[in-house]
Amino acid sequence: MPTADAAAPSPPGDAAPPARRAARAGVAEALGAPAVAMAATFLAFGAAVREAGLPIGWALAASWGVYGMPGQLVLVQHAASGGAAGVLPAVLGAVAVNARFLPMAIALAPMFAAPRRARAWSLLGAPFVAITPWAAAMRALPGMAPPGRLPWFLGFGLASWLVAGAAAMAGHAVAGLLDPATRAVLVFANPLYFALLLAADLGRPGTRGAVLAGAAAAPLALVLPAAWGLLAAGVVGGTAAFFLGRRGGRRV
Amino acid sequence: MSEADLALLFTALSCLALRVAGLAVAGALRADHPFVAWAAAVAQATLAAFVVLAVAAPSGALATLPLAARVAALAAGLVGYAAFGRRLLPALLAGLAVLVLTRAI
């Protein structure tokens, strides 16, 4: 997996400014395995939206506005059930399952800083803070020169975001062709892709502890309310890994 | 505006607020600040828990896939990752192919 293209010297004949080259490298990175995994999942999401009786514009707005599949699914399930529970429980449930955006944004923020660039520019990356761009960025950005990091993330994020929206609309349009079994296979592309990323992370001492502790804490999610279970497992596992890593004298 | 639209609007705004808050709060910190390292560990652990649950004890559409098919697909993906020179796309496709095949059997 190429990780440091943006930091590499420009190839002969490439007169594009470094920021544009970094953004292009981010787009290229996004249009491989991440795009396949994302398109498969959002295709299934589009079909689920159609089944819930919601229009194609809603599928696109949810994909681009929420851009976090667990939260999107909470909203669709709420709509499919006729909204009997009310708006507030649906919003709280959807935000709780996507609460990981906060620690993800915190982890990314320092890497977006660059000399002679106002910090406010980093906020352009906000809409794209989600598992796929985050996981790719945590691997690629440390090996890159600081000025190229934010453009790389914006290129990667925008490309994935567009793929997700297009796939959701396509799924809505062809919902009748996707039986439940096919949809389940499409949805599985997402955790499978993340599992491959984690397997790669197991080889890196800095992240190994957090991956193992998170996996060990996963059963917590089974005994806690569904909306909070995953977040609780992440906080418990991540905090344990953080302190164990510090005691071991290295960063987690 | 329907209830589904309202729920979507408020969720989208709340999610954007979480993202902006994280970027704004930590933008002034160094990458090796303990708070940033802790947040990265929590995010990484959340992702690991998500994957374990999706394979071992999923809900929704994934629960309709047999456990054996989910585990076989995961194993094929990991073997493919090692076999195809740590490239993600062929590994992902190998895992999905095995999932489809296992379901067909």
Image (cartoon, rainbow, N blue to C red):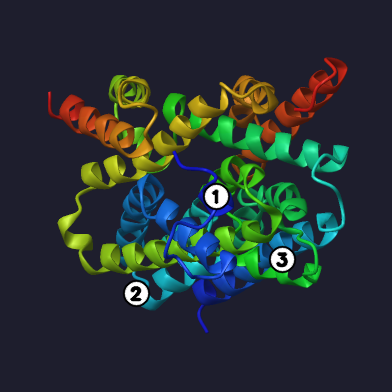
- Foreground mark, 2 or 3? 3
Up the image or down, A237 lies above or below A116; here it is above
Up the image or down, A101 lies above or below A216; here it is below
Say if labels 1 and 2 share a chain. yes
**Badge 2 amino acid:** Ile
The answer to whether residue A151 is seen in the rendering is yes
Q: Is residue A11 left or right of residue B104?
A: right
Q: The residue marked by circle 2 belongs to what chain? A: A
Element marked by disc 2: helix
The answer to whether residue A86 is seen in the rendering is no
Q: Which residue is drawn at 80% across and 22% down?
A: A250
Q: The residue marked by circle 3 belongs to what chain? A: A
Q: Residue at x 27, y 66 (%)?
A: A170
Camera-side residue of A139 and A52: A139
Up the image or down, A248 lies above or below A219; here it is above
**Badge 1 amino acid:** Ala
Quote the CA–CA distance across marks 3 and 1.
Answer: 22 Å
Of mark 2 and mark 3, the one earlier in the sequence is 2
Q: Classify 10 Å Cα crowding around label 3: few (below 14), some (14-19), many (20 and above).
A: many
Q: Name the residue under label 2.
A: A56
**Badge 3 amino acid:** Ser
Q: Is residue A201 left or right of residue A104?
A: left
Element marked by disc 1: loop
- Foreground mark, 1 or 2? 1
In the picture as drawn, the residue positioned furthest to the top comes out as: A248
Q: Name the residue under label 3.
A: A122
Residue A8's disc is 1
